[in-house]
Image (cartoon, rainbow, N blue to C red):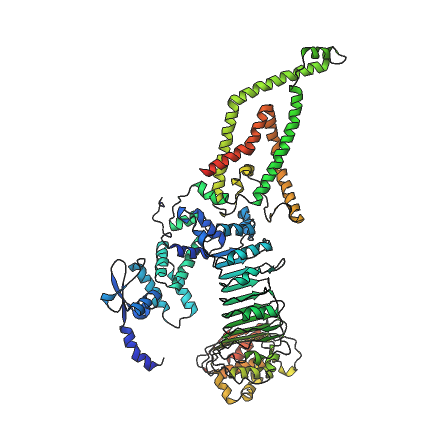
């Protein structure tokens, strides 16, 4: 073999399996280009087990540079699959803008016979959603399924994905029944992501092995009674929390929860509506992330109950998006004037409303992030409360949102910094 | 673990070392907790009970040479310590892979043979970054790869895809052009033929001349005859030496086309068909200014009308560009007379195609 003028070939001594793995990290175009490097490299790329069809022909710069980037993406995929050798474990299709939707069916049929484990189909927003081909539902080797803008219809006789561990559906058309069916028939499902899916209203997730559940969108109710091992839960309501949704019902029995994130309009209503107090404690809950519109005394109470039932909480993130024009009593509006410090005193009502033992709940709290415009007293109150009772607090991040007035900001910062701190290591950071 | 427990366990932990032997025979001892970070070593210790003394050192895979081993142990030493933040680990990793390419490649192989997956991922990503977005020349330079493929071979992947619709489109366009050209040529030739097949007998001519108003026509006829003869003579000259030259020219031309197309081929993605490779698309390279927007030409005859309309527009556009070139060619072809006329036709069509396929096979 010809030698490079400057010495021995460096990379080709790497085992081919590793070379395949390296090429798997590249978009398919880059991987395929290696075939003209040298004789040894001619067919290496045809063995890569993961195909990343990242359509880079959209990049205008590249197009200008090389008119051949204006290519037909669908045909390239056809050709790559034709030239490909060996198993295909991963197939990632991004951007189907230039692809005939029907072509995807053929590829799905093809790859499901090659030991497919990871499938991503990311349809572009223009055009009709891709309706999943029924052959996919026979693919028992599937481990990871990510769909964006697809249509999810389960064929009759679907026996389930016996290897599926991760499923992410974003902007996918899926019915309650279809979701319930696919989840309950995938016994090893560990992670489920549902983002802005259409067609869902009463979600019933029946997955005994589920560890992580993340849902964003518009829906009426969530039922997940059989997931005792759930560790991470994130629920974001797009258009407000529906009337009949009960948080304690969702959280019931999820004693292994490690992180909880609740967000959405009227989330405080959800907290208020908790019919029964949390009787169970969440001993593993370490991260709590709440996004509320405003803090009123009732909401704070509920938050404190949440805090109390999670004695080992380490990080708390609180985002308050106070609407500046809210129909609340004048008295609650925080008066910020020159002699504010003199007038304003921590009333400590939190301290009073909570029983003494509730203070123990802050025993492990190390990190707090609060984002708020600090329009109302309660916002300050909670900062004061946390500073006063979190004994091992290390970091308190405060972001004063929607405040253009530098002077006012400064005064708020001054006031917040003056609160007494229980933890000697507590540091305040302002953004 | 409480402080007391630590105090009890610590001395033992401190004491225990693992003995490792690299392929060159050298043996060294390594702290157990560092060595145990490598799944390969860990398994050797637990399954075969090796490594506890110098005589029972663990033999490392051949790819792990002493200098790479020390690198790997550095990596393990850092990452086995619990409680490091992600940021710390990331910045360590970033610094860690700042080594020369040769060592990075060796490190990748060695880490793989020790089943140290996080390090394999790290180095693989680093290597992938060295390939991404680079020209083949740059990649060859980085890894000292030999440039041992012929230009023909580099173009081979392109040829695999000669069934591209764009090429089909071009072929169709050229076919149409050729047909048009033939028709036009036929028209011309008919005129010429009328003149050339002037084999009226002397008697006929005489009767023609003697006829009412035949004078001028007769003169014209002879003139044409003379012209014709002159043209035929020219033709003979051309066929004796001119045609040969012409062919050579064409060959040269094609070769240079091939060269230019192969030069640019490296910049193109290999699975993209290059128009330059297509037998009939020679003209594309002739007209370097030609830029056709090939986007979305997902044509199969009889596809949706929007597409077709777009296509037709493109073909027209193409034709317009081509036409700007055609008149000269027409002149060239036609001026060379009726016999000569057919030669360039086949040159443009079958002959060149034959030559291309022949080149392709060699």
Q: Is residue A298 above or below residue A68?
A: below
Left or right position of B174 against B151: right
Give the total of numbered labels: 0
Q: Using residue B36 as the reference point, say whether residue B319 is left or right of it.
A: right
Which quadrant holds residue B179? Answer: top right
Image vertical order of residue A379 relative to residue A153, above or below: below
Which residue is found at the position 35% from the left and 64% from the top? B75
The image position of residue A210, as x and y in percent, is 51, 72
Q: Give the quarter of the figure containing the N terminus of chain B.
A: bottom left
Q: Residue at x 56, y 52 (%)?
A: A74
Residue B101: % across, % down? 37, 54
Q: Nearer the viewer, residue A188 or B74?
A: A188
Q: Residue at x 43, y 68 (%)?
A: B86
Q: Does the image show residue B101? A: yes
Q: Position of residue A198 (x, y in %)?
A: 62, 67
Q: Determine whether, in the image, residue A17 is placed left or right of residue B271.
A: left
> Which residue is nearer to you in this view: A301 or A10?
A10
Report the quarter where the C terminus of chain B lies: top left
* View extreme (front): residue: A157
Task: Determine whether A173 is above or below B172 in the image.
Answer: below
Residue B257 in the image: state x and y as whole percent: 50, 37
Q: Which residue is most to the left? A: B55
Residue A400 appears in the figure: no
Q: Quadrant of residue A377?
A: bottom right
Q: Residue at x 55, y 70 (%)?
A: A183
């Amino acid at each position: 073999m010809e030698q490079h003028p400057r010495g021995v070939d460096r990379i080709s001594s790497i085992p081919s399996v590793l070379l395949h793995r390296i090429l798997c990290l590249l978009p398919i175009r880059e991987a395929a280009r290696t075939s003209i490097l040298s004789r040894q490299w001619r067919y290496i790329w045809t063995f890569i087990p993961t195909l990343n069809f990242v359509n880079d022909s959209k990049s205008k710069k590249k197009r200008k540079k090389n008119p051949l980037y204006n290519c037909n993406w669908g045909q390239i995929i056809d050709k790559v699959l034709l030239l490909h050798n060996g198993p295909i474990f991963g197939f990632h299709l991004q951007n189907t803008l230039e692809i005939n939707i029907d072509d995807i069916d053929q590829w799905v049929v093809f790859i499901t016979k090659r030991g497919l484990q990871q499938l991503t189909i990311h349809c572009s927003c223009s055009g009709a959603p891709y309706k999943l081909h029924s052959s996919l539902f026979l693919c028992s080797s599937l481990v990871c399924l990510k769909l964006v803008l697809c249509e999810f219809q389960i064929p009759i006789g679907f026996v389930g994905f016996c290897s599926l561990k991760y499923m992410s559906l974003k902007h996918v058309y899926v019915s309650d029944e279809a979701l319930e069916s696919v989840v309950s028939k995938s016994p090893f499902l560990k992670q489920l992501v549902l983002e802005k899916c259409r067609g869902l209203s009463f979600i019933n997730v029946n997955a005994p092995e589920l560890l992580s559940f993340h849902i964003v969108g518009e829906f009426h109710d969530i039922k997940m009674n059989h997931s005792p091992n759930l560790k991470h839960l994130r629920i974001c309501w797009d258009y407000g929390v529906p009337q009949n949704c009960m948080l304690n019902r969702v959280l019931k029995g999820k004693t292994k929860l490690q992180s909880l994130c609740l967000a959405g309009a009227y989330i405080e209503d959800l907290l208020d509506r908790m019919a029964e107090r949390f009787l169970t404690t969440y001993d593993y809950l370490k991260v709590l992330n709440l996004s509320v519109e405003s803090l009123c005394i009732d909401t704070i109470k509920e938050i404190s109950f949440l805090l109390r039932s999670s004695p080992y909480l380490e990080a708390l993130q609180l985002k308050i998006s106070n609407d500046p024009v809210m129909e609340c009593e004048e008295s609650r509006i925080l008066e910020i004037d020159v002699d504010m410090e003199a007038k304003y005193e921590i009333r400590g009502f939190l301290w009073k409303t909570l029983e003494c033992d509730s203070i123990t709940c802050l025993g492990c709290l190390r990190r707090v992030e609060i984002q708020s415009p600090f329009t109302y007293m309660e916002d300050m109150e909670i900062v004061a409360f946390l500073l006063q009772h979190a004994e091992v607090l290390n970091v308190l991040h405060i972001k004063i949102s929607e405040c253009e007035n530098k002077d006012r900001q400064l005064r708020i910062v001054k006031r917040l910094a003056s609160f007494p701190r229980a933890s000697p290591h507590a540091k305040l950071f302002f953004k | 673990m409480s402080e007391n427990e630590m105090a009890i366990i610590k001395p033992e932990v401190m004491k225990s070392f693992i003995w490792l032997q690299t392929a060159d025979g050298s043996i060294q001892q390594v702290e157990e907790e560092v060595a145990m970070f490598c799944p390969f070593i860990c398994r050797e210790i637990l399954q075969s009970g090796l490594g506890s003394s110098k005589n029972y050192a663990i033999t490392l895979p051949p790819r792990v040479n002493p200098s790479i081993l020390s690198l790997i142990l550095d990596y393990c030493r850092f990452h086995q310590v619990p409680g490091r933040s992600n940021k710390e680990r990331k910045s360590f990793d970033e610094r860690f892979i700042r080594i020369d390419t040769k060592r990075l490649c060796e490190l990748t192989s060695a880490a793989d043979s020790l089943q140290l997956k996080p390090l394999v991922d790290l180095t693989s990503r680093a290597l992938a970054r060295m390939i991404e977005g680079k020209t083949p020349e740059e990649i060859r330079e980085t890894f000292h790869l030999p440039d041992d493929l012929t230009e023909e071979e580099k173009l081979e992947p392109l040829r695999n895809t000669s069934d591209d619709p764009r090429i089909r489109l071009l072929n169709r366009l050229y076919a149409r052009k050729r047909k048009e050209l033939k028709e036009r040529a036929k028209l011309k030739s008919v005129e010429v033929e009328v003149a050339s097949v002037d084999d009226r007998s002397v008697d006929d001519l005489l009767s023609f001349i003697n006829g009412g108003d035949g004078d001028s026509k007769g003169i014209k006829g002879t003139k044409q005859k003379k012209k014709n003869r002159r043209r035929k003579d020219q033709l003979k000259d051309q066929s004796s030496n001119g045609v040969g030259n012409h062919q050579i020219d064409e060959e040269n031309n094609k070769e240079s086309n091939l060269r230019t197309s192969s030069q640019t081929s490296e910049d193109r993605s290999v699975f993209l068909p290059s128009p330059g490779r297509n037998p009939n698309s020679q003209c594309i390279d002739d007209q370097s200014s030609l830029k056709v927007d090939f986007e979305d030409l997902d044509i199969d005859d009889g596809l949706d009308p929007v597409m077709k309309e777009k296509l037709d527009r493109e073909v027209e556009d193409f034709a317009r560009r081509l036409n700007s070139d055609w008149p000269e060619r027409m002149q060239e072809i036609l001026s060379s007379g009726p016999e000569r006329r057919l030669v360039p036709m086949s040159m443009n069509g079958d002959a060149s195609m034959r030559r291309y396929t022949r080149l392709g096979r060699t």
